Image: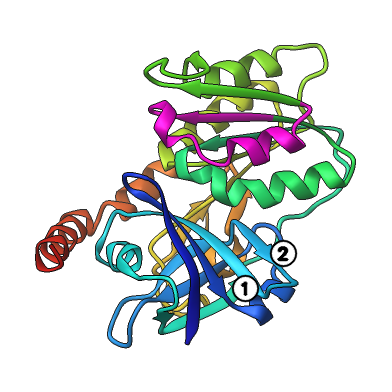
Amino acid sequence: MNKIIENKKLSENVIQVTLEAPFIAQARQPGQFILLQVDENGERIPLTIADVDTNAGTITLIVQVVGKTTFLLSCKKDGEEIAYVVGPLGTPTHIEQFGNVVCVGGGIGTAPLFPIAKALKEKGNHLTVILGARTKDLIILEDKMKAIADEFIVCTDDGSYGIKALVTQPLKNLCEKEKKPDLVVAIGPPLMMKFCSETTRPFHVKTLVSLNTIMIDGTGMCGGCRVNVGGKTQFVCVDGPEFDGHLVDFDNMIKRLNAYKKQEEHKYHECKLKNA
């Protein structure tokens, strides 16, 4: 059992949960995730670790409420407990001094991007951060990202904050410069990562994406998280979650992600009515 230290709302459908998990906090590296099960009979879902406090022995998760499990998590109060938290899982991000690095966060994807961007900056890279969301209210971790960035750009679809553009616009502008990026790390919705990868492809800029697929056991045994990368089957839980964005079959991944969308929506609304 893991105690909730703090569960607070960042926006209408986004929560920030700080959990007591000293061993995970000590072992976690940027890019890794956990599997969380709210109660004894619930499903397990993968959530990337947004931050840790090794002194306090806590991990911080930023979660978008989209289904039954995330809704039940959002209803938990400070001091209550989570049935199971397993981790850290996945292959950590490879951190080195690449030179000119661009980190692109879309919506809730900024949460898993933050520890990666921070580690890349600490390694001596010149860091440009691009954050994007539909509206201003959905921009998260702005202050933390701005504090570590050498260059900082915010985009919103509706123009309510920053520049009115998709994140691919400033990304393309950076790739067109004489000193183009040495590495791009893009994390966000699948379509956003797909188009970031397509933006950098003509410029031959290495682009990493972090995938969040359907996941059950987190050990590579069930095959639920399988993706096609460069014509080969890979498992996000053990081979990832990061892959070369130019090799990922995003269309196939998106199709698999939508396989249970209707059931997920039904359970979400059923759960909301029951807990109203």
Residue pictured at 28% horizontal, 68% vertical: 72
Q: Nearer the viewer, residue 38 or 230?
A: 38
Residue pictured at 85% horizontal, 37% vertical: 125
Residue pictured at 69% horizontal, 66% vertical: 53
Whether residue 175 is visible to the viewer of this picture, yes or no, is: yes
Residue type highlighted by circle 2? Gln
Residue type highlighted by circle 1? Pro
- Quarter of the rendering containing residue 265: bottom left
- Residue segment shown in magenta: 129-150
Query: Marks 1 and 2: in contact by CB < 8 Å?
Result: yes
Q: Residues within 10 Å of mark 1 (few under 14, many from 20)?
A: many
Percent across and percent down for residue 197 are 56, 32
Q: Residues within 10 Å of mark 2 (few under 14, many from 20)?
A: many
Rendered view: 257 above or below 134? below
The disc placed on residue 88 is 1
Q: Earlier in the sequence, mark 2 or mark 1?
A: 2
